[in-house]
């Protein structure tokens, strides 16, 4: 599968996940789209059609510090700021779709960001209401080995923390 084919597959997965997510949301709410490697501007309360329009012109761009960007672009505005303001209301499904591995950042940054989020929710009296769905579109041994080593083969992380949607 060439890089362009992976991007088309990622875009299709975004659309499918959005269709499922919008069926469980209240009628007046849509999904929020955040890219950890690109800026798409304000992209909240979106329909599936809105998602298609936004993702169509986008193209992949090299390395992404997935854990660092997850924390600053998603967890900070959508969880931490709302916890502090007392406006955190509903569970979040955070889908991480990538064709590589987190770079340039320490290997455990992504896992640490997810665990920290769960801890901060519990400190404020919430259950761990952020769930994570990972989709890797990679044929490189290095990315697949990272995925297996850091995500799938750490039962103490995902069974003990309840933070991962398998």
Image (spheres, grey):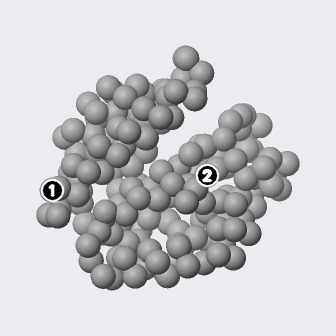
Q: Which mark is residue 125?
A: none
Count all numbered tags in the image, as a single digit: 2
Would residue 35 be found to the left or right of residue 99 on screen? right
Asked whether 38 or 31 is in front, the reply is 31
Mark 2 → mark 1, Cα distance in angstroms: 28 Å
Graded by Cα atoms within 10 Å as few (under 14), some (14 to 19) or many (20 or more), the crowding at tag 1 reads few
Secondary element at image label 1 = helix
Kindly identify which residue carries mark 2: 131
Q: Judging from the image, what secondary structure is the residue with disc 2 in?
A: strand
Q: Residue 36 appears in which quarter of the rendering?
A: bottom left
Q: Is residue 34 visible?
A: yes
Mark 1, residue position? 4
Q: Residue at x 42, y 27 (%)?
A: 46
User: Residue 95 at what x, y percent from top left?
Assistant: 48, 51
Looking at this view, is 59 or 17 the one in front?
17
| Quadrant the N terminus occupies | bottom left
């Amino acid at each position: 599968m060439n890089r362009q084919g992976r991007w088309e597959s990622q875009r299709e997965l975004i659309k499918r996940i959005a269709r499922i997510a919008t069926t469980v949301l209240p009628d007046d709410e849509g999904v929020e789209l955040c890219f950890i490697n690109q800026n798409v501007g304000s992209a909240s309360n979106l329909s599936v059609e809105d998602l298609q329009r936004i993702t169509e012109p986008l193209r992949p761009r090299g390395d992404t510090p997935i854990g660092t960007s997850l924390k600053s672009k998603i967890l900070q505005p959508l969880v931490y700021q709302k916890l502090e303001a007392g406006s955190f209301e509903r569970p979040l499904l955070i889908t991480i779709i990538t064709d590589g591995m987190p770079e340039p950042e320490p290997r455990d940054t992504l896992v640490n960001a997810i665990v920290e989020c769960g801890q901060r929710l519990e400190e404020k009296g919430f259950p761990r209401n952020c769930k994570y769905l990972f989709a890797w579109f990679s044929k490189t041994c290095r990315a697949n080995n990272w995925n297996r080593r850091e995500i799938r083969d750490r039962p103490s992380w995902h069974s003990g923390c309840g933070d991962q949607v398998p």
